[in-house]
Amino acid sequence: MKLIILAGGGGTRLFPLSRTCLPKQFLKLGDTDSLLTQTVKRFLPLVKPADIVVVTNKEYIHHVKTELASCGVAEAHILLEPVARNTAPAIALAVRFCQDRLGASEEEVLFVSPADHIIQPVDIFIKNVRQAAELAGQNKIVTLGVKPNKPETGYGYIQTGEPFADGYQVESFREKPDRTTAEEYLAAGSYYWNSGMFAFTVACILDQFRRHSSEIAAIAAAPLDEFINQFSTMPNISIDYAVAEKSDQVVMVPLTAEWNDIGSWDAIYDVLPKDYAGNALNGDCLPIDCANTLMLGRNRLIAGIGLEDVLVVETDDVIVVAKRGESQKVKDVVAELKARGRREVDEHTTMYRPWGSYTVLGEGPGYKMKKIVVTPGQQLSLQLHYHRSEHWIVIGGTAKVTIGDQEQMVHVNESVYIPPTTKHRLENPGKISLEIIEVQNGDYLGEDDIVRFDDVYGRA
């Protein structure tokens, strides 16, 4: 069996923690691993690291590499989508990759999973995956469905029919319902939440693409390199719309483990531990006479007084406050911010790069201050800026600095100055993280005022 993990989404339903630069699959909620790392570890009893394919995009490749290394599966494969598309093109690309690069036969089972779910306990989940894989070997597309315990309007639904082996025939897939319809689904007893996980053989899914999505099938028939070149012409369509809703080969296995797709702050509240009053607290929080409230802080104290059924999420540049049950409307906040051209939709004040990270400490007309962290052995590109000068002050570790044709070592409490239009590079030759304070001065301080001459990460 090959495992395909879909990790390319830039979801914003967990704004302000999840943003385009760091979507929810890379978030660590509390003291746990990131959601992507949890997903990988969940499948390790079933597949070898070399049989794991993570589908993402070039903006997230270094996040994915870091996550895979952290959970000991650096030999897993990273497959980059040339452009952002929905799940059907991503799955078709991964199938072709498994055939052309991993030698998957037409009879081999592929299991597709999103990267951002919480599922416990793992042993029960593994049992369900094995059931799905066995049915997939019978020329079926198998999906895992979750028995609903409330009238949830944030999930799609699966309507089941007659029993089939360990599961049921699928009658239909239903879109996210309104409250009244969700209550009807719950009362009917034959509807399950759609988990977004699928199992099928290579032969089965290719046949179903040919039957129900000829546009995808035509491109997917090409060798991998040609497929990648044509990927941008693929329709932006989900696997549900492209195949599952049209196929008569779909069966569902009930997922008997506890499942949460972490699709809203209400979902986060559900999975976090609670105090005696039902408050879910993470970070520096002080609740007084509060009940059934989520407080999630990162950098500042959150003090709540008399709150009930409230969600409070704090970052150093955004605070979101909402009633419990209304957090699906966070997407409306993001849409409005995007319409206003606000940077908060895409960026955190801390931005991660292949070499480490930087945090904006303050800025104003003509100046910007950053804290830059370079991980051991890493280096920034050889670059110059036309419109700004930079002062670097080392506050931790040791820096190797190139300015023009000169190289020098800069230690704690020492500083250097880089004039405009001067080639320069920052490196960390040491064994611990290099930390510097950077002060920029100039008429234009945008991140696009950069010319790269040499870069080990291929950005020059």
Image (cartoon, helix red, strand yellow):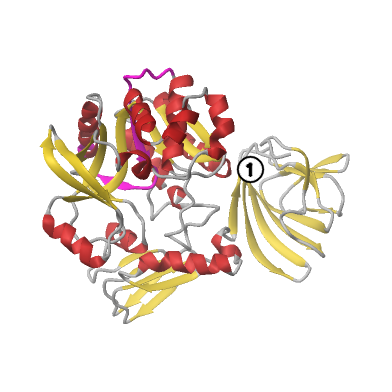
- What percent of the width, then of the height, locates residue 75? 47, 26
Disc 1 element: loop
Q: Is residue 90 in view from this perspective?
A: yes
Residue at horizontal 55%, vertical 52%?
21
Residue at horizontal 29%, vertical 74%?
309
Residue at horizontal 52%, vertical 69%?
336
Tell me which segment is drawn in magenta. Answer: 103-124
The amino acid type of the residue labelled 1 equals Trp
In the rendered image, the vertical position of residue 203 relative to residue 332, given as above or below: above
Q: Quadrant of residue 440?
A: bottom right
Q: Nearer the viewer, residue 448 or 437?
A: 448
Q: Is residue 273 in view from this perspective?
A: no
Residue at horizontal 23%, vertical 39%?
125
Q: Nearer the viewer, residue 187 or 351?
A: 187
Q: Is 369 included in the stretch rendered in magenta?
A: no
In the rendered image, the vertical position of residue 258 relative to residue 150, given as above or below: above
Residue bearing the label numbered 1:
355
